[in-house]
Image: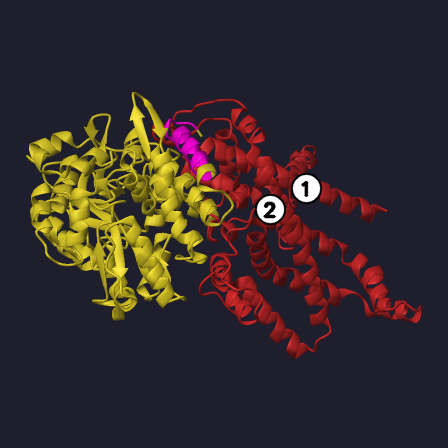
């Protein structure tokens, strides 16, 4: 009996999901389900309280915001797509948007964007990442970029200046290691692909290029190998640490926040997290754009998020009303400031770029002058999930393979995955 | 079970005379069906929660099933292609299968031996200390695998770990070593983790068996001149054969499908291809590559492997009992 009752309850629960139907003109009595990634903005709770109030005022509908961990998010999206229980609107990482669009789970936004007159006011890099088969599926929300963050105390005591070329990175690392043998002069993490690509691009290499319908990875080109050799060479010379071979970006952040790292490639969103992890670090670190080989800037990935509308939503107008509220105007600015990201609306971005804050300006410069995109392909998610770049880095750093062998393997795998192979 | 008997008895009494001839047939049908009727709710729940997913996995394993198929809910049959790909994959024979099988054999052996040793120790303790020690080891069992894994990762961490610190202080190594990058040291840590997590179950189960061995048997053996080793292997172990069968089969099943203990270690989620096992391989292929069909085929393979091992083992045990 109990079991039967439980089954009935299960069935009833399954049927009642997403049942807020009705008139689409008025949001009264409706609830919009939204998934937002956790950890982007430390004051997200307060932020969404305000958004909920504003959304209720504007449309009369309630907002049900659920925070999802980045680490679980991809699986949760996939299982909810399978079960037809996707939210109405969700934050999707820029590399996921084409993948979900390709699967047919998202609704195109072009008409809504045109109607709202926003077409010309969206950041181009994010539009490109959110476009699949010439339709926009991801509304640009925010983006960040990684630059070179350094510990000013360590730099001062070692008597070095922030580097502007690769040779200067190496000499700075050498000086820091001499002064602080127990510290990590420069963190070269093995499981953090986005800290690798700047060196590939900086040396004139490519991660992957599209010709016709075929992707080719350039990770094993002579230029790419030169960049990889420089970056992993810093570890081989003992300026990184043995542990860093298996570090993810979160481990880099932890070590940096403890004051154990001289310099590292870190995101524009990390300063807040560093101070939050260790209040003593306040004012003791700064950033510069990632140096180019002989000066200038090495490009770095513009990573960010879209707001995407799932095609399971009952009320597309209501869903877009929320998307527009979030990605334009006051709320977009506030979110960017609180989270350390740049807004996805060009007019707002221009304001941010005027900033003279030493922890904003270098990232802004990198964003504008040294921003780049990973291959825009629905299959790039598979490359990330296969950890192609991480595998290459780890085998070089652990000494089990040299740069030439590891990069050749990685390039072969990436080419195959991007072209839909396995 | 006993409560069903009084219910059954009145049902057969006081029938009308006219039905006398048919009664035995109707009664035997009802009494034959009754256990099944009582089991039906439970079986239905099992069928929905266990059997149907199992069938689905088997069906997926014969398809090229990705995100597109999930959304469109269409089937995409490709026959045995997934299995062909698995069996022709170098990764399976050189990395995944050896990692899974060798690790399972080692960890089952270590868990059962260590658990039995602890059980013998517990059996020789007094009541109070036995309770104290067995509660202490049960804490290791009660700890979630995820938590336990992070503790071991922390112990062996290259920069801040206790192990490297001690080894360096003792002068055993000059610089910190990252123990997670090498296949053998990686699995040695997984082995420690799994044995630590699995031995309390063996210890407590074997202890229950040890306490049920009649003292007369042991005394008789002692009078006949059998030493402690002889008494253990010739008297106690044969008495505990069934218990060992259970703990070995369960440990084998658990240790074959270790997942969290590998996946959560640095490099274990895919950046170190040398340490993939069947469970992690299936997961990264399914959920990372959106190749649910291929992942399901790996899962089917793992299930069949476990079934085969269990059947062989159960048959051996039963045959020995008959002799």
Q: Is residue A223 above or below residue B79?
A: below
Q: Residue at x 22, y 53 (%)?
A: A268
> Which residue is at the front of the view, A209 or A223?
A223
Which hue is chain B drawn in? red
Residue placed most toward the observer, A359 or B96? A359
Instruction: Let me know if residue A409 is in the magenta part.
Output: yes
**Do marks 2 and 1 both belong to one polypeptide chain?**
yes
In the structure shown, which secondary structural element does the residue marked by tag 2 occupy? helix
- Quarter of the image for residue A407 reads top left
Q: Magenta stretch mostly in which secondary structure? A: helix
Residue B15 picture location, percent across and down:
64, 41
Reading the image, the residue beneath label 1 is: B309
Q: Report if the CB atoms under discs 2 and 1 are less than 8 Å apart.
A: yes
Subunit under mark 2: B
Q: Chain of mark 1?
A: B
Q: Nearer the viewer, residue A183 or B251?
A: A183
Q: Which residue position is annotated with label 2?
A: B256
Q: Residue A112's quadrant in the figure?
A: top left
Chain A rendered in what hue?
yellow
Q: Which residues are magenta?
A: A406-421
Nearer the observer, disc 2 or disc 1?
A: 2
Give SS at disc 1. helix
Mark sitting earlier along the chain (2/1): 2
Residue in view at x 79 percent, y 59 percent: B237
* Distance between mark 2 and mark 1 Cα atoms: 11 Å
Residue B94 locus on image (x, y percent): 60, 38
Query: Mark on residue A18?
Result: none
Which picture quadrant has residue A278? bottom left
**Residue A187, relative to residue A22: is it above or below?**
below
């Amino acid at each position: 009996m109990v079991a039967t009752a439980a089954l009935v309850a299960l069935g009833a629960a399954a049927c009642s999901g997403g049942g807020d139907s009705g008139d689409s003109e008025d949001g009264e009595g409706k609830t919009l389900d939204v998934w937002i990634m956790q950890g982007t903005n430390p004051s997200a709770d307060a932020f969404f309280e305000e958004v909920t109030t504003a959304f209720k005022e504007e449309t009369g509908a309630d907002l049900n915001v659920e925070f999802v961990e980045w680490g679980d998010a991809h699986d949760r999206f996939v299982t909810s797509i399978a079960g037809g229980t996707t939210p109405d609107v969700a934050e999707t990482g820029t590399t996921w948007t084409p993948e979900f669009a390709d699967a047919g789970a998202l609704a195109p936004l072009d008409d809504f964007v045109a109607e709202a007159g926003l077409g010309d006011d969206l950041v181009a890099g994010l539009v490109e990442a959110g476009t699949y088969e010439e339709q926009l599926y991801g509304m640009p929300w925010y983006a960040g970029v990684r630059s070179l963050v350094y510990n000013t105390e360590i730099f001062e005591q070692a008597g070095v200046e922030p580097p502007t070329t690769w040779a200067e990175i190496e000499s700075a690392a050498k000086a820091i290691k001499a002064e602080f043998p127990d510290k990590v002069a420069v963190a070269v993490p093995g499981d953090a692909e986005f800290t690798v690509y700047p060196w590939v691009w900086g040396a004139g290499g490519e991660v992957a290029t599209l010709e016709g319908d075929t992707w080719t990875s350039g990770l094993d080109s002579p230029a790419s190998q030169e960049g990889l050799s420089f970056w992993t060479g810093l570890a081989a010379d003992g300026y990184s640490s043995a542990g860093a071979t298996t570090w993810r970006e979160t481990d880099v952040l932890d070590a940096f926040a403890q004051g154990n790292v001289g310099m590292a490639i870190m995101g524009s969103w990390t300063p807040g997290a560093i101070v939050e992890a260790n209040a003593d670090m306040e004012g003791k670190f700064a950033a510069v754009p990632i140096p180019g080989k002989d000066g200038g800037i090495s490009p770095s990935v513009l990573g960010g998020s879209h707001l995407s509308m799932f095609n399971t939503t009952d009320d597309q107008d209501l869903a877009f009303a929320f998307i527009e509220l979030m990605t334009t105007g006051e709320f977009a600015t506030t979110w960017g400031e609180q989270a350390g990201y740049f807004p996805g609306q060009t007019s707002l971005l221009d304001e941010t770029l005027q900033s003279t804050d030493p922890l904003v300006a270098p990232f802004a410069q990198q964003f504008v002058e040294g921003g780049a995109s990973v291959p825009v392909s629905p299959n790039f998610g598979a490359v990330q999930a296969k950890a192609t770049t991480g595998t290459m880095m780890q085998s070089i750093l652990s000494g089990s393979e040299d740069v030439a062998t590891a990069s050749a393997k990685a390039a072969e795998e990436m080419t195959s995955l991007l072209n839909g192979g396995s | 079970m006993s409560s069903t008997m009084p219910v059954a008895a009145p049902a057969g009494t006081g029938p009308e005379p006219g039905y006398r001839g048919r009664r035995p047939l109707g009664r035997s049908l009802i009494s034959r069906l009754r256990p099944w009727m009582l089991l039906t709710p439970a079986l239905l729940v099992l069928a929905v929660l266990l059997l149907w997913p199992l069938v689905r996995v088997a069906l997926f394993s014969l398809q090229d099933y990705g995100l597109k198929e999930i959304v469109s809910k269409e089937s995409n049959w490709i026959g045995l292609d997934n299995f062909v790909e698995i069996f022709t994959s170098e990764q399976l024979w050189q990395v995944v299968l050896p990692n899974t099988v060798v690790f399972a054999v080692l960890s089952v052996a270590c868990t059962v031996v260590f658990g039995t040793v602890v059980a013998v120790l517990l059996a020789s303790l007094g009541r109070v200390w036995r309770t104290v020690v067995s509660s202490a080891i049960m804490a290791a069992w009660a700890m979630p695998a995820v938590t336990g894994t992070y503790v071991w990762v922390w112990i062996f961490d290259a920069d801040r770990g206790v192990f490297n610190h001690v080894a360096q202080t003792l002068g055993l190594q000059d610089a910190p070593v990252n123990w997670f990058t090498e296949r053998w040291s990686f699995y040695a840590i997984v082995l420690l983790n799994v044995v630590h997590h699995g031995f309390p179950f063996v210890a407590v189960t074997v202890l229950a068996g040890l306490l049920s061995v009649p003292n007369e048997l042991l005394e008789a053996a002692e009078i006949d001149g059998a030493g402690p080793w002889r008494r253990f292997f010739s008297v106690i172990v044969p008495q505990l054969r069934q218990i060992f069968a259970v703990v070995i089969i369960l440990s084998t099943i658990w240790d074959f499908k270790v997942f969290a203990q590998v996946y959560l270690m640095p490099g274990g989620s895919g950046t170190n291809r040398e340490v993939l096992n069947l469970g992690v391989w299936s997961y990264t292929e399914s959920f990372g590559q959106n190749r649910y069909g291929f992942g399901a085929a790996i899962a089917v393979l793992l299930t069949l492997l476990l079934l085969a091992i269990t059947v062989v083992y159960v048959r051996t045990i039963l045959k020995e009992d008959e002799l």
